[in-house]
Image: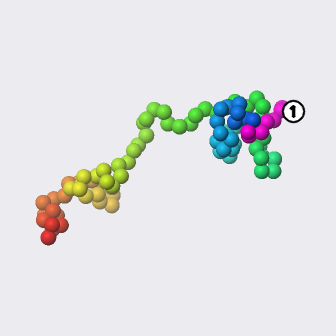
Amino acid sequence: MPDYISVVDTAARWGISPRRITVLCLEGRVPGAFLIGNSWVIPANAEKPADARIKSGKYIKKPCASMIPKDTVVNPMGRKRKKRAQESKADST
């Protein structure tokens, strides 16, 4: 039977916070970790999971409403178009 260590010991070994260790266990990213009561136990030989954050920068960033020019109308389908001259006159009256 392999040796098991606590979340605090694992945090010191891996150099991250105990809370982050708990989250990794909850997500199932630490193989062999399981709960005893309300405490996680982690195999002593468990490796630190790889960082799963996006590093390439290739994610889709949607503009917020304040970034859309005022002369642009967004229809319910999400397509943007410029206001027509008639709409601009109607809005100003």
- Looking at the rendered structure, the secondary structure element under dot 1 is loop
Q: For label 1, count other residues whose C-alpha is less than 10 Å away and answer few (under 14), some (14-19) or many (20+).
A: few
The answer to which image quadrant residue 85 occupies is: bottom left
Magenta-drawn stretch contains 89: no
Question: Which range of residues does the magenta coloring cover?
Answer: 2-8
Q: Residue at x 70, y 33 (%)?
A: 12
Magenta-drawn stretch contains 3: yes
Q: Nearer the viewer, residue 86 or 65?
A: 65
Q: Residue 46 appears at what percent x and percent y? A: 73, 31
Residue assigned mark 1: 1
Q: Nearer the viewer, residue 39 or 52?
A: 39
Looking at the image, residue 82 sits to the left or right of residue 64; the answer is left
Looking at the image, residue 51 sits to the left or right of residue 34; the answer is left
Furthest residue in direction right, as rendered:
1
Q: Residue 7 appears at what percent x and percent y? A: 74, 40
Q: Residue at x 33, y 61 (%)?
A: 76
Q: Does any portion of residue 43 appear in the rendered image?
A: yes
The answer to which image quadrant residue 93 occupies is: bottom left
**Looking at the picture, which amino acid does disc 1 mark?**
Met
Q: Residue at x 83, y 32 (%)?
A: 3
Q: Residue at x 43, y 35 (%)?
A: 57
Q: How many marks?
A: 1
Q: How is the image coloured?
A: rainbow
Screen quadrant of the N terminus: top right
The image shows residue 21, relative to residue 44, as above or below, that is below
Q: Residue 39 appears at what percent x and percent y? A: 77, 47
Q: Residue 53 appears at what percent x and percent y? A: 53, 37
Looking at the image, residue 72 sits to the left or right of residue 26; the answer is left
Q: Does any portion of residue 24 appear in the rendered image?
A: no
